[in-house]
Image (spheres, coloured by chain):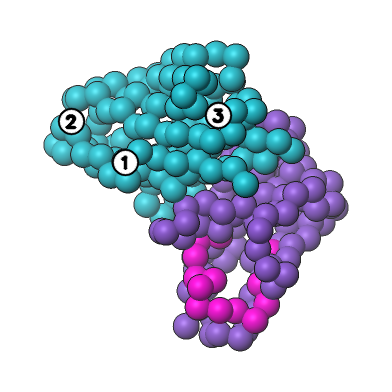
Chain colours: A purple, B cyan
Amino acid sequence: KAGVTQTPRYLIKTRGQQVTLSCSPISGHRSVSWYQQTPGQGLQFLFEYFSETQRNKGNFPGRFSGRQFSNSRSEMNVSTLELGDSALYLCASTADRVYGYTFGSGTRLTVV
Amino acid sequence: GESVGLHLPTLSVQEGDNSIINCAYSNSASDYFIWYKQESGKGPQFIIDIRSNMDKRQGQRVTVLLNKTVKHLSLQIAATQPGDSAVYFCAERATGNQFYFGTGTSLTVIP
């Protein structure tokens, strides 16, 4: 059974640009969550999608957005990138939104 | 908001010794807790979980202890091996099925 797949693995962008990250959950998982991981802040919750609807949202500015498609694949977008957006972005999926999530390997975003 | 904290940011142990990683959580209503292991270049991997109606759960070489009175969670790794070197996170499930993670403890196993 394939795990959670995130693409791309690495990305370098310039301040002011925008970026789109992709996540394919485990087959059958309808819930996808996104997290930002930085050395100083640890894992910070961005948002969760379930059956194409945003269920929860963390405390991030509106520059961070996401969506989920009918096949449960999800994308997150960050517009007007700032240096502080440099982080590892992790996607996690779950079947039932109750127990633990399975994480992907993440996308390492560097903003220069 | 919720907060999950770790007592020590780094821990070094000798190979073969037991490791104990601690975690404090803030929401007494959190009903489910997970320990994750994150190796370099990888996403967090599930290790073991525990529900709030339990105070101890054992897995293979790992034990999680939950003390709800002081809102404390610990992960014990028996006979620590070099492959156990990683960052360990605890997570609590709070209201709305949202998980909150600590910043992590970096475990280094000395051969």
Report the chain holding disc 3: B
Q: Dot 1: within a 10 Å radius of its alpha carbon, few (fewer than 14), some, or many (20 or more) residues?
A: few
Q: Dot 3: within a 10 Å radius of its alpha carbon, few (fewer than 14), some, or many (20 or more) residues?
A: many
The residue located at (50%, 40%) in the rendering is B4
Q: Amino acid at mark 1?
A: Leu
Q: Amino acid at mark 2?
A: Glu
Q: Secondary structure at mark 1?
A: loop
Which residue in the structure is indicated by mark 1?
A: B8
Instruction: Measuring from the top left, give residue B72's x and y in whole percent.
Output: 45, 27
Q: Amino acid at mark 3?
A: Phe
Q: Which mark is residue A52?
A: none
- Disc 3 to disc 2, how far (Cα)? 27 Å
Quadrant occupied by the N terminus of chain A: top right
| Left/right of residue B20 with respect to residue B70 in the rendered view | left
Which residue in the structure is indicated by mark 2?
A: B15
The residue stretch that appears in magenta: A76-89
Which residue in the structure is indicated by mark 3?
A: B33
Nearer the observer: mark 3 or 2; the answer is 3
Q: Write down the quadrant of residue B94 in the picture.
A: top right
Report the chain holding disc 2: B
Residues tagged by mark 3 and mark 2 found on one chain of the structure: yes
Mark earlier in primary sequence (1, 3): 1
